[in-house]
């Protein structure tokens, strides 16, 4: 995923944030604390905001979306007062501005999530973090995420399965992007795996290639199973009042087989470097 802030988002954010703060000193502090590079740009408040966001896009050392999330965090997390709820009217200049920013992000397949994260629409903060690890070639951090999922099996098997499934999805997406394959229209774990599997090379020996194909077919079933587990009992889709229960050994099986699959894909990626 590109970390560039789309021009339409720059325009919406600059207009809303400038109108809200309407003070050069406050804006300077806001952007500097958010990690925006360089000295404060010249111009009025709106021009200053737009110029600083564009400067983030132009700096290869800066994660522009990360700075954007930091800039809009306090504003996006302002909540209407209780009295407004009681009066049945929660439309204020702030809520209108929040909606304007969200609409601008969504038109570019982005969204804002709490605590200052701007991520691809349909992704989670965890998924974005995993994708960043992979793009940096930081496979060690992926292993750490799996270790965390395994360590949480006893206390929260649902969350462990959700984490394992998210790691598979992130690795499959990275494989597709890394090899310039066509991303499936449906970003579920099944279609992602099919795209990757069709690209995987089989052993040159005919007999061994048949054996390997059987293993890959089994992996398809496993991946479908992990994805189904996540949908039915994982933490990502809400658990409801009485969620289905899963035993620790069932969760451990799902997480461990997910780890094997991810390790295999990362080994393939590593051999291509």
Image (cartoon, grey):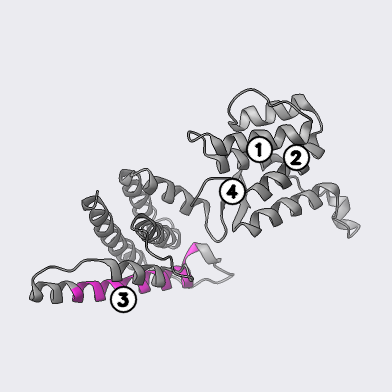
**Chain part drawn in magenta:** 213-235
Question: How far is mark 2 from mark 1, CA to CA?
Answer: 9 Å
217 part of magenta stretch: yes
User: Which is the main secondary structure of the residues drawn in magenta?
Assistant: helix
Circles 4 and 2: CB atoms closer than 8 Å: no
Residue 188 occupies quadrant: bottom left
Instruction: Choose the circle earlier in sequence order: 4 or 3.
Output: 4
Question: How far is mark 4 from mark 3, CA to CA?
Answer: 33 Å
Circles 2 and 1: CB atoms closer than 8 Å: yes
The structure residue drawn at horizontal position 68% and vertical position 41%, both measured from the top left corner, is 72
Residue 221, numbered label: 3
Residue 169 occupies quadrant: bottom left
Secondary structure beneath dot 4 equals: strand
121 part of magenta stretch: no
What residue sits right under mark 1 in the picture? 71
The structure residue drawn at horizontal position 29% and vertical position 71%, both measured from the top left corner, is 198
The structure residue drawn at horizontal position 43% and vertical position 65%, both measured from the top left corner, is 183
The answer to which of 219 and 240 lies nearer the viewer is 219
What residue sits right under mark 2 in the picture? 17
Instruction: Choose the circle earlier in sequence order: 1 or 3.
Output: 1
Question: How far is mark 4 from mark 1, CA to CA?
Answer: 11 Å
Residue 265 occupies quadrant: bottom left
Secondary structure beneath dot 3 equals: helix
Circles 4 and 1: CB atoms closer than 8 Å: no
Circles 4 and 3: CB atoms closer than 8 Å: no
- Residue 21 in view of the camera: yes
What residue sits right under mark 4 in the picture? 118
The structure residue drawn at horizontal position 86% and vertical position 50%, both measured from the top left corner, is 92
The image shows residue 25 at horizontal and vertical percentages of 75, 24
Frontmost of labels 4 and 3 is: 4
Secondary structure beneath dot 2 equals: helix
Frontmost of labels 1 and 3 is: 1
């Amino acid at each position: 995923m590109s970390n560039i802030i789309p021009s339409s988002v720059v325009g919406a954010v600059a207009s809303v944030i400038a109108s809200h703060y309407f003070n050069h000193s406050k804006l300077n502090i806001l952007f500097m604390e958010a990690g925006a590079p360089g000295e404060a740009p010249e111009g009025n408040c709106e021009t200053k905001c737009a110029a600083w966001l564009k400067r983030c896009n132009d700096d290869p050392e800066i994660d522009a979306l990360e700075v954007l999330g930091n800039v809009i965090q306090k504003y996006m997390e302002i909540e209407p007062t209780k009295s407004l709820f009681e009066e049945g009217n929660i439309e204020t200049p702030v809520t209108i501005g929040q909606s304007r920013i969200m609409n601008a992000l969504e038109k570019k397949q982005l969204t804002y999530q709490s605590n200052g994260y701007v991520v691809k629409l349909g992704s989670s903060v965890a998924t974005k973090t995993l994708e960043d690890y992979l793009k940096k070639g930081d496979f060690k951090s992926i292993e750490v995420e799996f270790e965390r999922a395994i360590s949480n099996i006893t206390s929260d098997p649902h969350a462990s399965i959700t984490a394992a499934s998210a790691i598979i999805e992130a690795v499959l997406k990275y494989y597709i992007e890394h090899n310039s394959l066509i991303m499936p229209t449906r970003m579920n774990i099944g279609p992602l795996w099919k795209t990757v599997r069709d690209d995987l090379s089989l052993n040159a020996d005919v007999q061994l290639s048949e054996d390997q194909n059987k293993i890959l077919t089994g992996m398809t079933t496993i991946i479908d199973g992990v994805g189904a587990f996540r949908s039915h009992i994982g933490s990502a889709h809400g658990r409801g009042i009485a969620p289905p229960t899963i035993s620790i050994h069932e969760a451990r099986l799902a997480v461990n087989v997910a780890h094997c699959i991810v390790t295999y894909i990362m080994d393939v990626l590593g051999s291509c470097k």
